[in-house]
Image (spheres, helix red, strand yellow):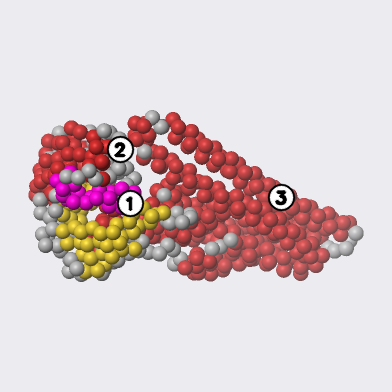
Amino acid sequence: MIDKRLFRLPGTKKLLLVLAGLTLLQAFVVLFQGKYLAEALVNSWEQKSLQTIIYPMVLFAIAFILRHLFNLLNTKIVENYAGKTSENIRGQLLEKVYNSGPEMISEEGTGNLVTSSLDGIDLVENYFKLIFTKLMNMSIIPPVLLIYIYTQNIASGITLTIIVPLVILFMIILGLAAQSKADAQYKQYTILSNHFLDALRGLPTLKMLGLSKRYAKNIYTVSDEYRRRTMNTLRIAILSTFALDWLTTLGIAILAVFLGLGLINNSFPLFPALVTLILAPEYFLPLRDFSNDYHATLNGKNALNAIFELLDKPSDNKGSDLKDFTWDEDSQVELNNLEFTYKGSGDKEVSLDIDHLKLSGYHRIGVIGKSGSGKTTLIRAIGGFLLPYSADIKINQQSVPNFKQTNWQNKLTFLPQSPYLFAGSIAENIAFYRPDASMDEIKKATHAAGLDEFLKVLPEGFDTRIGEGGRGISGGQQQRIMLARAFLADDRHILIFDEPTAHLDIETEYALKKPMEQLFHDHLVIFATHRLHWINEMDYVIVMDNGQIAEQGTPDKLRDHNGAFSKLINNMRGDQL
């Protein structure tokens, strides 16, 4: 029930030792509570003096209070551990996702990662709060009580010893069934999360293509399957809880009948029978508590297992193979035999296969191709966000295994289709690449990006707060903020554009074209686009088709013969993309 990987978490072993000590004290307090209560009742039954009744009742009250104090202390310690450890795991997970970048998102799905880092961590925290306390109670309290019961009445001890294995056997049988259901349930939950987030992100496109209603049916199907699986899991959970309650109640009833017959036949005194009957429910209580929360711990264990699997994935940290790197007009990059594969459940699907590509100086490189041709994959591989399966790469004559090099990425500015803006002020978002930039430098970059008029209408100007993901800012202004970031990062001489104007209307795109052309100066520009007018601004064009370079060269040379470039241009003009 406890994953062995839990012991590598800081503070787990110390927590278990502290809980073992507290639970042992709690077991003896429970024992004294039953003993003194039975003693007071027996003295009352035998009509002894009031003092012989009050004294054990006072001791019973003290034991009762101590029991709950130990329980409260136990809970506080576990909650403190659960809170700190779960946040530590969340931090490790987010750091892992951040370092891995789009590669992990492509493999695992955004919904899965969001589910793990939000709902998954909450389940893990609840798992920590339950599992340690329940297991310690079940491991320590029943044996202590059973030993004492054996000293009072051997037959009662034997009866309880026989009943417990039966209860545990039913727990194992039903628990295994519940675990398989819970595993399937958690997987279905992540699938539903991925479907929902993908649909939410692509809602504008789905509406434009008239597919939103069809996709709504898809979400309904997945959601209904999740509902059906949830009901099946709950059915087993309720059945297992009922079975355990029934068995423990039956065990106590059998014990009560046995003790009652013994008292009638004067086989043993009242005190051993009464203290045994009082302690019997306490003996079964840890088992019942564990069973009641078993399914909650299963969900937490599944979530923790999924998170551990993410954390245990090989870490592809940024390399340090590239030394003393700067980019100027004499710099060059040469790619040979670059192959990238998206990992699937079956055979690897080759999505990028580049025989040869050379980039140099301050050239403007256009990357064009129909949807799904590999433009974005190539752009992200060059940006170091995706690691190639194999590649022969030379940057300024230095051989590197991939572009995920610290010195390389510190010299490039990435401008995607949808720039991500963080919750904060506009000034903070512009200074993304240079957090230490002065206000004068930020204003200069803002002017170059054409944001002056926009800022004038804002009462708080640069201090205006924007929401996470750029809420409250139009798409065009988001792109201008992205351009301002690039203007401010004047020490980065590599610009990578991944269809930055794809979601903008033509008027907004033309308004952004002038500041973007100004940004091109003294930069290596790699520009992936669907828009024809950008091709005329390029020095060199790469035509992608089915993950390969179908054709490359200057725009004029490519126009001279009827090759892949000409066919693609004709298709684009005919709106066939």
- Residue 144 or residue 532, whichever sits in front: 532
Q: Which mark is residue 172?
A: none
Residue at 17% over, 69% down: 324
Disc 1 residue type (three-letter): Gly
Residue visible at 32% across and 42% down?
371
Residue holding disc 1 = 547
Could you tell me which quadrant the C terminus lies in? Answer: top left
* Amino acid at pointer 2: Leu
C-alpha distance separating marks 2 and 1: 16 Å
Label 2 vs label 3: CA separation? 62 Å
- The mark that comes first in sequence, 2 or 1, is 1
Residue type at mark 3?
A: Ala
In this view, the mark in front (2 or 3) = 2
Return the mark for residue 577.
Answer: 2
Mark 2 vs 3, N-terminal side: 3
Callout count: 3
Residue 520, image x and y in percent? 13, 49
Q: Quadrant of residue 176?
A: bottom right
Residue 142 percent coordinates (x, y)? 68, 63
Q: Return the x and y of residue 567 as percentages of the image width and height.
A: 25, 41
Q: Please state the extent of the stretch shown in magenta in the rendering.
A: 540-559
- Answer left or right for 547 relative to 406: right
The main secondary structure of the magenta stretch is: strand
Task: Evaluate if marks 1 and 3 touch, with contact meaning CB atoms under 8 Å apart.
Answer: no
Residue 542 seen in this snapshot:
yes
Callout 1: 10 Å neighbours few (<14), some, many (20+)?
Answer: many
Residue bearing mark 3: 243
Of mark 1 and mark 3, the one earlier in the sequence is 3
Point out the frontmost of discs 1 and 3.
1
Circle 1: element type: loop
